[in-house]
Image (tube, rainbow, N blue to C red):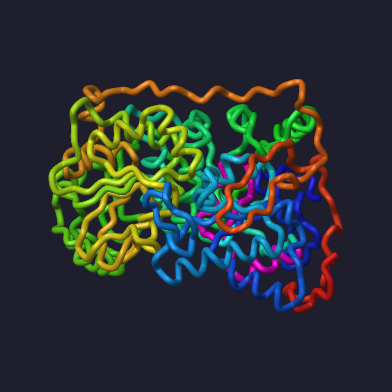
Amino acid sequence: MSTQPRTLFDKIWDAHVVNAKDDGSALIYIDRHIVHEVTSPQAFEGLRNAGRGVRRTDCTLATCDHNVPTDDRSQATSVSTFIKEFESRTQVMTLEENVKIFGLTYFGLKDKRQGIVHVMAAEQGFTLPGSTVCCGDSHTSTHGAFGAYAFGVGTSEVEHILATQTLPQQKSKNMKVKVNGTLAPGVTSKDVILHIIGTIGTSGGNGHVIEFCGKVFEDMSMENRMSVCNMSIEAGARAGLVAPDEKTFEYLIGKPLAPKGEERNRAIEWWKSLKTDEGAHFDKSVEIDGSDIGPTVSWGTSPQDVVPITGNVPDPAQMTDEAAKKSAIRALEYMGLEPNTPMEQIKIDKVFIGSCTNSRIEDLRLAASIIGPGQRVAEGVYAMVVPGSGLVKLQAEEEGLDRIFKDAGFDWREAGCSMCLGMNPDQLKPGERCASTSNRNFEGRQGPGGRTHLMSPAMAAAAAIHGRFTDVRKIQTTARLHEPKLVPKMEPTDKDQTSESHPVDDAPAQSAGAPTQAVGKPAGLPKFEVWKGIAAVVEARYVSLHSVNSIS
């Protein structure tokens, strides 16, 4: 291990190397693996064909989210009858079968803990500072908000992790994005990450892991940090992370799968060391003044196509770069926009508040606070709110947020990925324009021919009420500010004892359609030690499942 100053990413990487090679690649240990219905079927089939089991069932957590309808489920009796679309139904039913066969913990549709993987795992305390986290989904970077190295993997890599709890990786470079100062009223974490992507471009982070630092990120809540890290992928990065601090430790108190008692105390001592050393080298650095950031909206078909809400649709004729000009012309044609149109004059058809970027309780509180007394969704606009998990939905209903939305004409839905990606019934029709709190505005992302504009929950709520993009700062002075009833913070009790169990040892492996029971015992990374040589090292250019003869 190097004695030179190290970045946060360096420290996490070094702690997880099982075997390193001279070319910079390494076999690294994976602490946490989250599984969903879309990228897991072939992986489980590979295990089945090879006669292998899941190496660490206690470090694997599954749910369904991408394909599930967000219609009311109160009368649903089974996946086979509730999900109408054949491929979606097949994938969810296949996952339910696989979790039973391989003995995995599963939060199904009838479980209040079911939800989007990157919302569910975080709120359960499954993600911990300093850990490595993988999921067959690109926005796994969300978990970097905890000071974890979290990244998405493909189906073959899902199989490799299930079988060995390791993954061969080439180490990424280090990049620092520092945002100084403070944010003005009406400016949110979503505006910050959209501004960053607009500044560095969607290739700005290529080959790097971004560490977000500076006062703006220090001031952010954990949920706001999750929104930022979520979209580090749209900046081209392998992952994004924020150093853990007291807010991180506070957030994890009382979470079912987080360490408790003396184990938590030991964990915090180690977590406090997870910060970049003074003088550590970054291969790339960017500094931004927080006061330069305003409410931000996308106009094109790439997350880098953004302008302040006070700006205009760009004019390709004014662009000197030919590639950028051609891209802008195509984007404007697809989006049905004219150059130089003021953003606040653009009318919308639909509003989507949800996704793994912005579907947590703070996002819903913010959106609800924009709705004034007696205000309604604009005529001709359909607006939907999709909580990120069943637990978020329950808390929002306990605080009365659902009533605020429903009284204003918003559709209050069940948990799921919903309209973020058009893999379920929640989709745009061709030509429909949507104000969306999701993370991608590619052509057809929310449905064939759909036109997506990315923005914050506050901006999306304002657009729903006014029927067009609206600078939220103009209405915040008159908006009703709600004071939601907070769920009491779960403090440690005398019963909190050190546990040497693993994260999901005590969570039941579920049968299809059955509600799961609460995880009762504390868990976490036992003793927070770095284990060397736990996985078998295969001396090959790439570690292949076909090279592993047995999994102990």
Nearest the eye: 266 or 233? 266
What secondary structure predominates along the stretch shown in magenta?
A: helix
In the displayed structure, 468 sits above or below 396; it is: below
> With 105 as the anchor, is 63 left or right in this view?
left
Nearest the eye: 284 or 507? 507
Q: How many marks?
A: 0
Point out residue 40 in the picture as x, y percentages from the top left corner: 59, 66
> With 392 as the anchor, is 440 left or right in this view?
left
> With 103 as the anchor, is 380 left or right in this view?
left
- Is 341 one of the magenta-colored residues? no
Q: Quadrant of the C terminus?
A: bottom right
User: Quadrant of the rendered structure where residue 402 is?
Assistant: top left
Q: Is residue 24 visible?
A: no
> With 550 as the anchor, is 177 left or right in this view?
left
The residue depicted at 46 percent of the width and 36 percent of the height is: 394
The residue depicted at 75 percent of the width and 78 percent of the height is: 546
- Is 149 one of the magenta-colored residues? yes
Point out residue 506 in the picture as x, y percentages from the top left corner: 74, 44
Q: Is residue 222 visible?
A: yes
Q: Which stretch is magenta?
A: 137-164
Point out residue 161 in the picture as x, y percentages from the top left corner: 70, 63
Nearest the eye: 90 or 167? 90
In the displayed structure, 11 sits above or below 271; it is: below
Point out residue 117 in the picture as x, y percentages from the top left corner: 54, 51
